[in-house]
Image (spheres, rainbow, N blue to C red):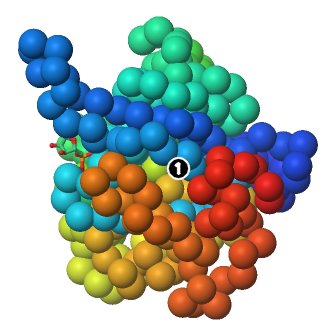
Amino acid sequence: MDAVTSTVPDSAPHSHTPAAARLIGITKTYFKPDGSVLVEALRPLDLTIPRGQYIAIMGASGSGKSTLMNLLGCLDRPTAGRYELDGKAVESLNDDELSRVRGQKIGFIFQAFNLISELNIAENVEIPLLYQGVSASERRVRAIESLALVGLENRVHHRPYELSGGQQQRAAIARALVGRPAILMADEPTGNLDSATGQAILEVFEALHAKGLTLIMVTHDDRVADRCQRVVRLKDGEVEYDRIGARRGFTAKHGGAHGAAHGGAHA
Ligand code: ADP
Ligand code: MG
């Protein structure tokens, strides 16, 4: 049983399958206490991410990357606009509904691995399932499945500090996958790793992408972005450019800059 492919039964984009994520006229404005505008972190933004796409979000500090990731990941709500996650409108869900959707649909990977040192690797990977009421025996089965996907099935009983940085990040990826998310979101996932280890993590992402998972990654590294299918660069809360990753020879079969700029799920 494969935790990734089972979440994405229909990974090939078709016109009748909803996009993984579709933002239509999304804005995020931060206000001062007096009600005046402090900063427009995202200006009206349209972005369609077809299922199965592997996409890098880039941009200078302050350009809106974290704001966008927080919205996409259902950690925050937009000021205005519509967000369809896996075909379901989520922009006006209340906090409880939003966190439930987040638990079901999104897996997060951070630059800091955020593993709990008192727990072994399998216990760490099981954590997201605790909130979903999955039985202890099934939690363990699924944790080991997830760890096998990242090549760590023989480190189940190790503590995080007994693993290398790359292995810890693999464990964090397994934890993000265990809930069988529709989208895997990563914020600078190779930022704390040396380049050889970072390469190995990118190979894990590429294998997950090949299985049909949707991956959205923030990176500052052009060499990392060049390995993605698509690069969206933000500037001052707007899309500065949106390209299908031509530099490594990818073709535009999973949706292009034109369709994305118009919010159309054409792929
Ligand atoms: P990035 O991740 O690309 O560095 P952010 O999304 O964190 O950018 O921030 C975009 C803009 O929104 C910045 O000008 C930042 O100062 C502002 N901002 C982010 N979060 C808040 C907040 N909670 N309150 C006020 N302004 C914020
Ligand atoms: Mg940021």
Which residue is found at the position 41% from the left and 64% from the top? 240
Give residue 18's position: percent from left, percent from top: 77, 40
Q: For residue 127, what is the image quadrant?
A: top left
**Residue toward you, 190 or 3:** 190
Establish if 228 lies above or below 58: below
Establish if 226 lies above or below 59: below
Q: Is residue 180 left or right of residue 242?
A: right
Identify the residue under disc 1: 184
Which residue is found at the position 62% from the left and 41% from the top? 22
Q: Secondary structure at mark 1?
A: strand
Residue 159 shows in the view: no
Q: Quadrant of ligand 1?
A: top left
Residue situated furthest left in the rendering: 33
Which residue is found at the position 28% from the left and 53% from the top? 236
Number of marks in the rendered image: 1
Q: Is residue 224 left or right of residue 114?
A: right
Give residue 149's position: percent from left, percent from top: 59, 60
**Residue toward you, 159 or 97:** 97
Establish if 191 lies above or below 135: below
Quadrant of the frame with the C terminus: bottom right
Which residue is found at the position 40% from the left and 78% from the top? 224
Give residue 67's position: percent from left, percent from top: 32, 41
**Residue toward you, 48 or 52:** 48
